[in-house]
Image: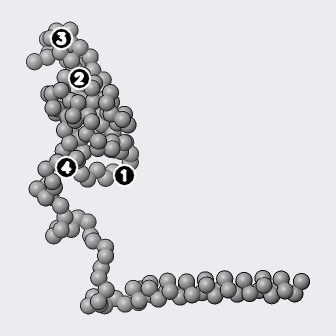
Amino acid sequence: MTNSIFATLSNFFGTVKRVAISLLRALKTTVPYLLNHNPNSLRKEVTEQYPDPVSSKTVDDLPPRTRGLLHNEIKECIGCHECEKVCPVQCIHIESERLLDTGKEWVSVFDIDHSQCIFCALCVEVCPTGSLTHSKRYEGAALERKQLIESFGEGEPPRRGEFS
């Protein structure tokens, strides 16, 4: 019985020792940063302010095949729904209808949910008119998820005689 008590106490104090050493190592690293406000310190700052006017990327700095946020030239879009069909995550939603006057397809809703897009470019490759492309925009921050849905649709179709 006494052997197990000594073993238990030994394990307990061994654990306390390891925790204390770990805590002292952590404090040795962090306390100098908390107490030293000297700008001439030898420590290098690791946080970069955003946007940094010196080192921030511009559109010209990006590689030519950059896949930024999707963009659709709605005037060129024929409403074929191929991009919607091929999208593996269903981030594109299209509603269209055929105009009786001209027989052309009117794209009333063309929404892209950038929060779901995986930038695979399958939709861009399958677009027959080339209206859907990856832009050079890569910053898509928003406070709410619904703000990441971009609408390109033309709205309600024109009444008879209004289409040009």
Circle 2: residue type: Gly
Left/right placement of residue 13 relative to residue 58 reads right
Crowd class of label 2 (few under 14; some 14 to 19; many from 20; radius 10 Å): many
Residue at 80% across, 88% down: 6
Residue at 57% across, 87% down: 21
Q: Secondary structure at mark 2?
A: loop
User: Is residue 96 positioned above or below 126 on the image?
Assistant: above
User: Is residue 160 positioned above or below 62 on the image?
Assistant: above
Circle 1: residue type: Leu
Horizontal and vertical percent position of residue 97: 26, 16
Quarter occupied by the C terminus: top left
Crowd class of label 4 (few under 14; some 14 to 19; many from 20; radius 10 Å): some
The answer, for residue 109, to whether it is visible in the render is no
The residue at which mark 1 appears reads as: 143
The residue at which mark 4 appears reads as: 66
Residue at 37% across, 90% down: 36
Circle 4: residue type: Thr
Horizontal and vertical percent position of residue 139: 26, 53
Gap between marks 2 and 4 measured at Cα: 25 Å
Residue at 26% across, 70% down: 49
The residue at which mark 2 appears reads as: 79
Left/right placement of residue 72 relative to residue 60 reads right
